[in-house]
Amino acid sequence: MWNQIYDPLNNPVLSTLVAALPVAVLLGALAFFHVKAHWAALLGVLTAQLVAIFAFGMPAAASISAGVLGAASGLFPIGWIILNVIFLYQLTERKGYFEVLKDSIAGVSDDRRLQLLLVAFCFGAFFEGAGGFGTPVAVTGAILIGLGFAPLAASGLSLIANTAPVAFGALGAPLIALAAVTGLDLFQLSAMVGRQLPFFSVLVPFWLLIAFCGWRGMLQIWPAVLIAGASFAVPQYLISNYHGPWLVDVGSSVISMACLSLFLKFWKPREIWTSVTGKQSDNQPAGSPGTTHTRHPLEVQLRAWLPWFILSIVVVAWGIPEWKKMLDGWSSPKFQWPSLHLLVTKVPPVVSGPKPEPAVFTLNWLSATGSGILTAALVSGLVMGYGVLDILKVYWDTIKLTRNSLLTIAAMLAIGYTTRYAGLDSTLGLAFAHTGVLYPFFGALLGWLGVALTGSDTASNVLFGGLQKTTAEQLGLSPILMSAANSSGGVMGKMIDAQSIVVASTATRWYGHEGDILRYVFWHSIALACLVGVLVVLQVYVAPFSGMVVH
């Protein structure tokens, strides 16, 4: 048994700086030294192991075991999702149906700005709500590349768009986990997050378009942007406050897609942007050869959309708790991880009392979202006319295509699990908790840090939810508000976590450019996270925002 130590150097500043080294090495190697992602991740793993063992005093066997558990968790379920989404994409592309899908989306509007809004924000939010864990970025990144967007734009813009829906992703998984670790009421947490994120559901589409085409390009289509954001934000507030967290994203995204598509039947921008770079100088006049697209027969369009309809239905079904429970009952072996399970103890002030940390790997191979995606891909392959041997060949080609990405994700999660079990992340979290009257602002940034470290709003809530509740009670703040702020602030960290960046680079086939993607989204992530922090400060100290707090 080993108790975590949160100030091993007897100097909070030095301990915090040392705890940040693994993340600094990883992000620095990616962003500044242009190291390939899998090598940068392996450097991060090595740094995390050295810091955990020699600075924080974690037993070597436990530290190495935590890293191996993280690698296994990276491959399953996260890598499993990416592999099978890319497999489905490969199947549709080789049959020519992805080209038809591209033309079908272009049929809604030739304008690249409106295509981006429909695909990255509306369609991506649906997959976030249904599956989460990298699914939306993989799908929207692949579609945007098919539409002709540049790899950097397709990757970065998919990441920016996949923010506001994240707290309610995977049928409410992040908030369900937050309620479990804090003991707070799930419906109150859902309502509180639903009084924070709708502001950003309106803001993010505008932010997305400004990042792509600048202020002038955005202002030309602002009515459509407002329709997309508002028709998502209003249902997001209503469903989260009067139903619960489960169907917030699915319901809001469907309403947003319907409203935007209907609006575009009656409204067109004065200038059609055909540029995939977002630069006005690259545009061509409407109706020029660069903006034409094939009008496929309705039957062909339905065939092209069928694999994605199947994917949507299967992913939603796989997210239903009753269905998951039934599949887990058939086969879901659990393994208590050697040299780690219940051998590491969290201690105050991170938790109220000593708490041994479980380390269990669940091989829920039937109920995993990736298995649902594989099922959808196999059914779609047969429907599209593939033979069994052809399907196996495409799958093998997909494995070869994604092998470096899978290695990178495994290494990324190895870093996250090592820092979690060694207590490095708690040391970083305590630094935020010591900010006193400014804690409401930094509490939201703590959620951002958690997602940036772990790659998951769910994991961030598990990691820092208890700390948020305890600190809020000590400072006389609402524990419901600050726990919700952890999840709301966390969504803005989603675009810079290494896992999501690797998913984006894989989906867009822009391997080796993860550092470019990170630089593209980094300041967007920080700025939006700070805005969440400002909103939380207003909800604590300033009327009428303080009247929004759930008690």
Image: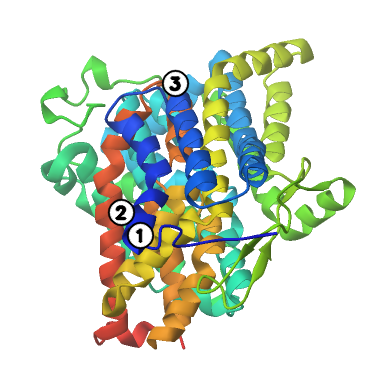
Camera-nearest residue between 273 and 417? 417
Q: At label 2, which amino acid type do we have? A: Val
| Of marks 2 and 3, the one in the foreground | 3
Q: Residue at x 56, y 66 (%)?
A: 175
- Numbered label tally: 3
Residue 509: mark: 3
Secondary element type, mark 2: helix
Residue 491: mark: none
The reply to whether the C-beta atoms of the residues labelled 2 and 3 are less than 8 Å apart is no
Q: Residue at x 61, y 70 (%)?
A: 181
Q: Residue at x 39, y 30 (%)?
A: 144
Residue denoted by label 1: 201
- Give how far apart the Cα atoms at labels 2 and 3 are: 25 Å
Q: At label 3, which amino acid type do we have? A: Arg
Crowd rating for badge 2 (residues with CA inside 10 Å; few <14, some 14–19, many 20+): many
The part of the image, by quadrant, that contains residue 495 is top left
Counting from the top left corner in percent of width and height, residue 328 is at 82, 51
Q: At label 1, which amino acid type do we have? A: Ser
Counting from the top left corner in percent of width and height, residue 110 is at 29, 31
Q: Is residue 524 left or right of residue 498?
A: left
- Give how far apart the Cα atoms at labels 2 and 1 are: 6 Å
Residue denoted by label 2: 204
Counting from the top left corner in percent of width and height, residue 475 is at 38, 85
